[in-house]
Image (cartoon, rainbow, N blue to C red):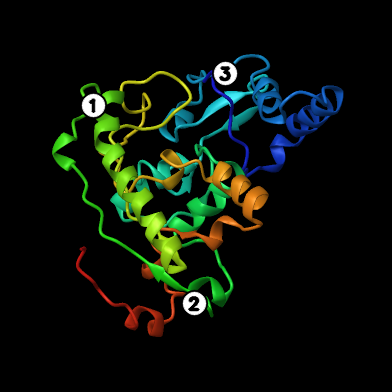
Amino acid sequence: HHSAWNIGYLYLHHTAYQAMLHWKRTCEANPKMWDQSLFRDVLRIGGIAFDAPGRPELRAKRLFLGYNRSVAIGILPVATFCSGHTYFVQRMPQRRGLVPYSVHTTFQYSGAVGKTHRLREGMMWLDPPEYYAPKARGFLQYEPTIPLHLAREAGVMDVESHFAMVNPQMVQLRAAFLLAQALDRILILPRMVCGIDRFWAPHNGTITGSQTPLPIDPCPADHVLDLEGMERHLRTKEGLNITDVLREYSLLDNPAMPASVRASARTLPPP
């Protein structure tokens, strides 16, 4: 009711035409203001009515009235029209066995680089064939040791216990990057596990109102890695892209991965 309304995906009936014209004029009159907030402000003109007299069917359909009670408004179901949180963190459609109509790469922390990586993690980004089978280089993958015995539920798991769970994973990851560099291979990131959610505001381990199970498994890479900073460093210092040094944890499960690459894998015990 009070938050910004995400308008990345809209389905409009022609009866909303006048309200949309009002929104268009408001955006033109306020070019420095967020169109998403203005959308909410326009539709809240005259108040929001959740119990409209004589319209009991609205509540049954989870609809409410706005724009002087002339427009019926509903929220698209977040299990099938997913935010970056409901898909990649809460994993709502996966846990319910649903196939989403759309996935919005919100709630992530590494800019455009992080958005692309999230979509690759979800196997929803189409790369050229050489991404899956580099001609001159191989891959390196390792099985991480994760202290899952440290996991606790929301409200008990805190920053310190989250750090105790994630830091050993980062130590292993650092060693793997060094080994991949020495062998001139591209590192396939492990499937990481996080103790708490990452968010811009204080919370008790999960965002209030979310259905996030703890620990978060798999944990999106941008929750613990500064992918945007890594890309910037690689470009500036070495003239490379982030895809020159790493791949997402789900790479070998991707249907685009050639069977010949999977078949060429060799498993070695650690020294």
Specify the amino acid type for callout 1. Answer: Met
Alpha carbon separation for disc pair 2 and 3: 54 Å
Specify the amino acid type for callout 3. Answer: Ile
- Which residue position is annotated with label 1? 157
Q: Earlier in the sequence, mark 2 or mark 1?
A: 2
Q: Earlier in the sequence, mark 3 or mark 1?
A: 3
- Which residue position is annotated with label 3? 48
Q: Position of residue 89 (x, y in %)?
A: 38, 42
Foreground tag (2 vs 3): 2
- Which residue position is annotated with label 2? 133
Q: Residue furthest left?
A: 149
Q: Quadrant of the C terminus?
A: bottom left
For numbered disc 1, what is the local secondary structure? loop
Q: Earlier in the sequence, mark 2 or mark 3?
A: 3
Identify which residue is drawn at 17% across, 42% down.
148
Specify the amino acid type for callout 2. Answer: Ala
Is residue 213 in sight in this rendering?
A: no
For numbered disc 2, what is the local secondary structure? loop
Quick check: 35 above or below 258?
above
